[in-house]
Image: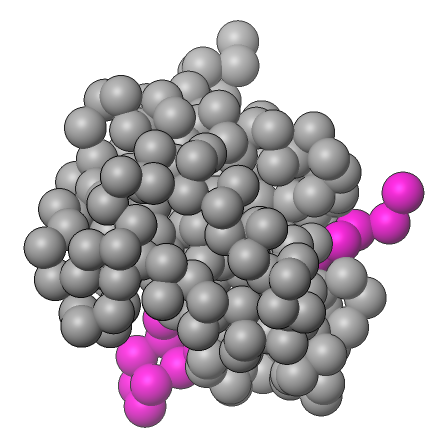
């Protein structure tokens, strides 16, 4: 089976600062892929290039066989994205926000509403579904953000540090949901700076990125992963 997500020499520079350099990835359908590295390693920059929010300086990225730079709208239809800080409309309820998200992806209204009810149940949000998002905790907001990313049934789901601020029960629930998503033959790209989270949640963690501290820090993270596999 070919890669559902691939990059070739993907690079992003800001003037003299290189945030991501020559990144090569091959990720298959059904993988829960952990993109591991310390803060400042370029994980968020990488994800933003992969979802079409940042244009790479050089190199290429393909999602479901579609070049994200050449055909961004087609590629984005295959993508779900949860940023590191959920950006929600405070004066909407969770249900209204999910309806809005479904409409952005042109999900047929009856199908949209069925999926919303299923997602509200899945994330234990039905009792608060009609409350303004301004009153939600960080963990609840993260659940709404993930539900919105799943609503249009994406092929690849990108998550940037999604467990930050979650209580242990919510983190376990997220793990179960992501694993079920991958069992359907779909793919998760999951970034974290915590090795233990990558080990616990991901089928294939990888240490990558080149932080400002240089190659030595990158090598140290790779050694930790290698030691785990011995």
Residue 37 drawn above or below residue 41: above
Rendering coords of residue 208 (x, y %): 45, 48
Residue furthest to the left in view is: 135
Magenta span dominant secondary structure: strand
Check the image and name the residue furthest to the top.
230
- Residues 193 and 228: in front is 193
Q: Position of residue 84 (x, y in %)?
A: 29, 57
Residues 145 and 17: in front is: 145
Provide the residue span drawn in magenta: 1-19
Q: Quadrant of residue 140?
A: top left
- Give left or right: position of 92 versus 138: right
The residue that appears at 66% across and 58% down in the rendered structure is 111
Relative placement, left or right, of 109 versus 51 is right
- Front position in the image: 18 or 45: 45
**Residue that extends furthest to the right in the rendered view of this protein:** 1
The quadrant where residue 64 appears: bottom right
Please check the rendered image and state whether residue 4 is part of the magenta-colored stretch, yes or no: yes
Residue 177 against residue 114 in the figure, above or below: above
Q: Residue at x 18, y 72 (%)?
A: 91
**Which quarter of the rendered picture does the N terminus lie within?**
top right
């Amino acid at each position: 089976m070919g890669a559902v997500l691939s990059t070739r020499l993907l690079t992003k520079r800001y003037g003299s600062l290189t945030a991501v350099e020559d990144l090569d990835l091959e990720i298959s359908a059904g993988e829960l892929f952990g993109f591991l590295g310390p803060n400042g390693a370029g994980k968020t920059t990488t994800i933003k290039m992969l979802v079409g929010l940042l244009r790479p300086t050089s190199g290429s990225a393909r999602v479901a066989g579609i070049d994200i730079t050449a055909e961004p709208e087609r590629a984005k239809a295959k993508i779900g994205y949860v940023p590191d800080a959920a950006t929600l409309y405070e004066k909407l309820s969770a249900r209204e926000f999910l309806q809005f998200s479904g409409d952005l992806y042109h999900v047929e209204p009856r199908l949209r509403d069925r999926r919303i009810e299923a997602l509200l149940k899945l994330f234990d949000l039905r009792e608060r579904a009609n409350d303004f998002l301004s009153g939600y905790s960080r963990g609840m907001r993260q659940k709404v953000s993930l539900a919105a990313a799943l609503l249009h049934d994406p092929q690849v789901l990108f998550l940037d540090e999604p467990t930050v601020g979650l209580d242990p029960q919510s983190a376990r629930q997220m793990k179960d949901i992501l694993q079920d998503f991958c069992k359907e033959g779909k793919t998760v790209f999951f970034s974290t700076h915590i090795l233990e989270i990558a080990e616990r949640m991901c089928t294939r963690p990888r240490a990558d990125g080149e932080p400002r501290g240089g190659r030595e820090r990158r090598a140290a993270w790779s050694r930790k992963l290698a030691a785990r596999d011995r």
